[in-house]
Amino acid sequence: MPTSGYTALSASLLCLLLANTVRASFPTTVVELHDDNFEHDTQAASGQTTGTWAVLFTDSTSRRHERAALVVSELAEDEDKEVIYAQVSQVTMTDPDMSG
């Protein structure tokens, strides 16, 4: 029965391939979220999210923004993470309640 060893090896390789494919599905850059893509990308309103998100809400006019954005960018580069890192610039988001 030499084929059973071959089948077990093939199954193991397939599992490794699938595990690496899942791991690679997390972006290694910070996702820029804005009015046009926030709901679509995160699916926040439906409760069926596209994964675990860590979102930095920033004000690009603040000096602290640069340091926080750098940390989030470094975290996003980690290929072994299971989190999607994103940032939202509060300057580019609109509040429908605030518009005239």
Image (cartoon, rainbow, N blue to C red):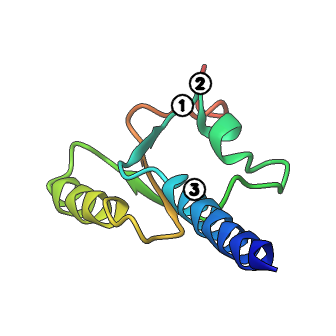
User: As displayed, is residue 6 above or below residue 93?
Assistant: below
**Amino acid type indicated by mark 3:** Thr
| Secondary structure under the numbered disc 3 in the rendered image | helix
Residue 23 shows in the view:
yes
Label 1: how many Cα within 10 Å (few below 14, some 14–19, many 20+): few
In the image, which is nearer the foreground, mark 2 or mark 1? 1
What whole-number distance in Å separates the C-alpha atoms at marks 3 and 2? 43 Å
Q: Which residue is mark 3?
A: 21
The picture places residue 97, in percent across and down from the top left corner, at 66, 34
Q: Between 94 and 68, which is closer to the camera in this rendering?
A: 68
The picture places residue 36, in percent across and down from the top left corner, at 59, 25
Q: Quadrant of residue 35?
A: top right
Q: Are marks 2 and 1 in contact (CB under 8 Å)?
A: yes
Q: Are marks 3 and 1 in contact (CB under 8 Å)?
A: no
What whole-number distance in Å separates the C-alpha atoms at marks 2 and 1? 8 Å
Residue at the spot 38% in from the left edge and 49% down from the top edge: 30
Label 3: how many Cα within 10 Å (few below 14, some 14–19, many 20+): few
**Amino acid type indicated by mark 2:** Ser
Q: Quadrant of the N terminus?
A: bottom right
Residue farthest top in this picture: 100
Residue at the spot 20% in from the left edge and 59% down from the top edge: 70
Q: Which residue is mark 1?
A: 94
Left or right: 84 in relation to 62:
right
Residue at the spot 17% in from the left edge and 62% down from the top edge: 67
Q: Which residue is mark 2?
A: 99
In the image, which is nearer the foreground, mark 3 or mark 2? 3
| Secondary structure under the numbered disc 1 in the rendered image | loop
Left or right: 15 in relation to 69:
right
User: As displayed, is residue 92 above or below residue 6?
Assistant: above
